[in-house]
Image (cartoon, rainbow, N blue to C red):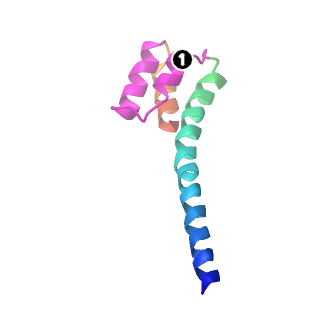
Amino acid sequence: MKIKRAFAALSVIAAAGAVPVVMASPAQADQLDCMNYLKARHYVVGAGVRSACDVDSIGGKVVCQGKLISLGVRPEHALNACVRA
């Protein structure tokens, strides 16, 4: 009986440790996808682009597009980058 309890406790601890890693990774990768898309199209990727590609902020992809366009990114490139974010 003690082995079952120990195994159950270890399973809960492992699951609790894995959930934040699984949940955080996609958002970070998406922001990088947005920035890499623009970098591949020869835009300078700095703090402004990094901020725009962070679509977790209020307004999401619409704000992303507006920020990128205001930074001089062509509208079609801004749309494609923000879809990746």
Task: Classify the position of the N terminus by image quarter.
Answer: bottom right
As rendered, which of 37 and 29 lies closer to the eye?
29
The extreme left residue here reads 59
The extreme front residue here reads 2
Examine the rendered structure and indicate whether residue 52 appears above or below residue 16: above
| Residue appearing at x 64%, y 23% in the figure | 39
Q: Magenta stretch?
A: 43-71
Q: Position of residue 8 (x, y in %)?
A: 57, 75
Residue type beneath disc 1 = Ala
Q: Position of residue 21 (x, y in %)?
A: 58, 49
| Residue appearing at x 37%, y 26% in the figure | 63
Examine the rendered structure and indicate whether residue 47 appears above or below residue 1: above
The quadrant where residue 16 appears: bottom right
The quadrant where residue 64 appears: top left
As rendered, which of 32 and 77 lies closer to the eye?
32
As rendered, which of 53 and 78 lies closer to the eye?
53
* Label 1 sits on residue: 47
Is 62 in the magenta?
yes
Dot 1: within a 10 Å radius of its alpha carbon, few (fewer than 14), some, or many (20 or more) residues? few
